[in-house]
Amino acid sequence: MSKRMLLIGLLVVVVALLSGCEILDAITGGGTTPPGGGTTTVTSVSISYHLDATISERLMPTYPVTTSADTVVMDFFRPYGGSYNAATRTFTNNWDNQVGDFSNTYLEVRLNAAEDAIEYFYARQQHGAWGWTYFNEIRGYNIPYSHTDGGSRYFTVTGTAAHLSLDRMTYKGWPSAGEGSSASNPNKWAYLDYVVDPSIDDVIPASNNSITIRLNQ
């Protein structure tokens, strides 16, 4: 009987090895699961960033330009709307005229196949606040998975190289009343654009720079 059981045991091991260890994984609980498991639905997405930058500014369109170090802080988030395509692992949303003075809005985030990184992300919006109009835009790639907190998965990059995952960042503002200023002729601005030649990079490498993308399930 002991020889028979030994043969059966050896057969189980051989079959497990030939089947990519699926049987052993089922017995031992082995194997790895990506952060999202490939089975969850994304209900909303937040893209936030904190980037030190050299801000250019002129009080009036004909005035000389001055520059100073400041911080571009932005949070693209709407807790409603949008749609998730599980086949492409892509979430998209826009919020024109939904709340406040928002226009030209769009957000897109795409997970990689393993769901352990944000493969691509893009967001933009124009909005009015305190008598000014602001336009913010960001586009980048390959933000790694950081952690899960409750029903949210976080993908984060920080530090002096945070902006190297970007190929575009736009920040500009102008008085809503006009005064000769506009989106194409702003009063204050900062850019990062690695697509144009020569490239533009007003972002200052700083230890407190960060980009965080939160996927809510």
Image (cartoon, rainbow, N blue to C red):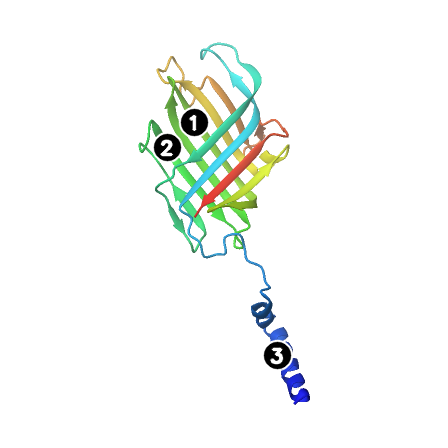
Q: Which residue is mark 3?
A: 12
Q: Image point 53% across, 18% down: which residue?
A: 56
Q: Nearer the viewer, residue 80 or 103?
A: 80
Q: CA distance from mark 2 to mark 1?
A: 9 Å
Q: Is residue 168 above or below residue 182?
A: below
Q: Is residue 216 above or below residue 206?
A: below
Q: Residues within 10 Å of mark 2 (few under 14, many from 20)?
A: few
Disc 2 + disc 1, Cβ < 8 Å? yes
Q: Earlier in the sequence, mark 2 or mark 1?
A: 2
Kind of residue sitting beneath label 1? Phe
Q: Earlier in the sequence, mark 1 or mark 3?
A: 3
Q: Nearer the viewer, residue 8 or 194?
A: 8
Kind of residue sitting beneath label 2? Asn
Q: Which residue is mark 2?
A: 104
Q: Looking at the figure, which quarter contains the N terminus?
A: bottom right
Corner quadrant of residue 17? bottom right
Label 2 or label 3, whichever lies nearer to me, is 3
Q: CA distance from mark 1 to mark 3?
A: 63 Å
Corner quadrant of residue 194? top right
